[in-house]
Structure formats: C-alpha cells, structure tokens
Amino acid sequence: MLFTETALQGAYIIDIERKEDSRGFFARTFCDREFAALGLEITNVQCSIAFNHKKGTLRGMHYQAAPATEAKLVRCTQGAIYDCIVDLRPDSPTYLSHICVELTADNHRALYIPEMFAHGYQTLDDNTEIAYQMNKSYAPGYERGLRYNDPILDIQWQLPVSEISRKDLEWDLLETVLIK
C-alpha cells in the first residue's frame, strides 16, 4: 500500500499496489503492521457499508464526540464519491480545515480518517457503495455533525445536492456551537 499524508496531519490517502497478470490484479487493502508503522489506529472493531441510489446524495458531516471518538478507513467499492473530512482537534494547526478527495471503485483509493475529524461525502454516480472500517463501535449518544454547507467550512461540493437526510440538514452552524 502507498500512504500519502494529506495537508491535515494524521489523515492519509491510501493507494493500492497492484500485482497484475493476465487474470487481472491482486492488491492488499489493509495490513495492521503497515498502519501501525505510521502510528495509525484502525483496529477493526466495526465494519459497515452505505449504499446510495442517486448521484448527488450527500451524507455528513458526521463525527463521534469523546469519549467515543472513532478513526475510520473509507473506500468506495461501487461508483464514485467526493469524500471530505474536517479537522476538529482544537489544538491542531489545521483546526476546522478540510480536504476532499475522490474515491472511486476504479481508483481503489481509501481515506484514513483520524479520531476527531468530521466526515462526509457526496455521490458522483448513481448506485454508489462505500465500505467503512472503524476502530470503535458506534455510540449513538455521542453522534455529532456539522452542516454540509456551513459558511465557515466553505466546502465546495461537486454537484447540487439531490438527497440528504433531515438530520444532516439540521446540524447547528459552527458559529453557534463550540466543538470539543
């Protein structure tokens, strides 16, 4: 695997290294030793998938508050997404900064998201599926979110939003909350 650290310290884009022959290719998508060598925690405690029918669907921006913070490894297994993360670590030099990366079934790219990062994505194709690996079990009482169109974040989504949950539309704006 090829790990590329993003502008947000601790967040990595992970590309596969293909071993190709006449049958196709084989590639490793996870190795605990390679993650540990970079100090990345991704003990697989929980794995999930999300399927989205419509291009333009937006999910996010979600995170888990302390003491239930979670790290994620996200990969698009069908279709394509524009995946965005926001640094919510108050002591970080990139606090409230974000990066976005295109993850597709064709590029086989993954995004490692450290604890205390908000995460969201927009589907770029119909019938898109995303696979998640998390280092902690979901704790509903600690679920939090940021508004996808918060002016402080100024995330430039790729498409008009075609589908979004009521909950994701109703997260408070950053100017009205203190993130801890």
Image: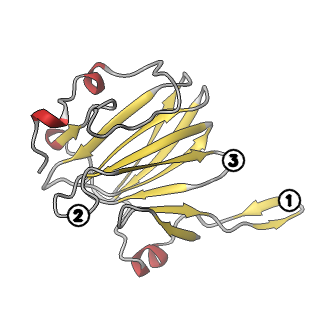
| Residue 102 in picture, x, y percent from top left | 56, 46
Q: Residue at x 59, y 44 (%)?
A: 77
On screen, residue 88 above or below 176 = below
Relative side of 113 to 13, left or right: left
> Which amino acid, mark 1?
Arg
Q: What whole-number distance in Å separates the C-alpha atoms at marks 2 and 1?
A: 46 Å
Q: Are marks 2 and 1 in contact (CB under 8 Å)?
A: no
Relative side of 143 to 2, left or right: left
Q: What whole-number distance in Å separates the C-alpha atoms at marks 3 and 2?
A: 33 Å
Q: Secondary structure at mark 1?
A: loop
What numbered label is drawn on residue 92?
Answer: 2
Relative side of 167 to 29, left or right: left
Colour mapping: secondary structure
Q: Most extreme residue toward the right, as rendered?
A: 22
On screen, residue 163 above or below 154 = above
> Which amino acid, mark 3?
Asp
What numbered label is drawn on residue 23?
Answer: 1
Q: Secondary structure at mark 3?
A: loop
| Residue 53 in picture, x, y percent from top left | 54, 23
| Residue 136 in picture, x, y percent from top left | 27, 56
Which residue occupies the foreground of this view, 23 or 148?
148
The quadrant holding residue 93 is bottom left
Which sits earlier in the primary sequence, circle 2 or circle 1? 1
Quadrant where the N terminus sits is: bottom right
Q: Depth-wise, is mark 2 or mark 1 nearer the camera?
A: 2
Q: Depth-wise, is mark 1 or mark 3 nearer the camera?
A: 3
Which sits earlier in the primary sequence, circle 1 or circle 3? 1
Q: What whole-number distance in Å separates the C-alpha atoms at marks 1 and 3?
A: 17 Å
Which residue occupies the foreground of this view, 60 or 34?
60
Q: Are marks 1 and 3 in contact (CB under 8 Å)?
A: no
Which sits earlier in the primary sequence, circle 3 or circle 2? 2
Residue under pointer 3: 106
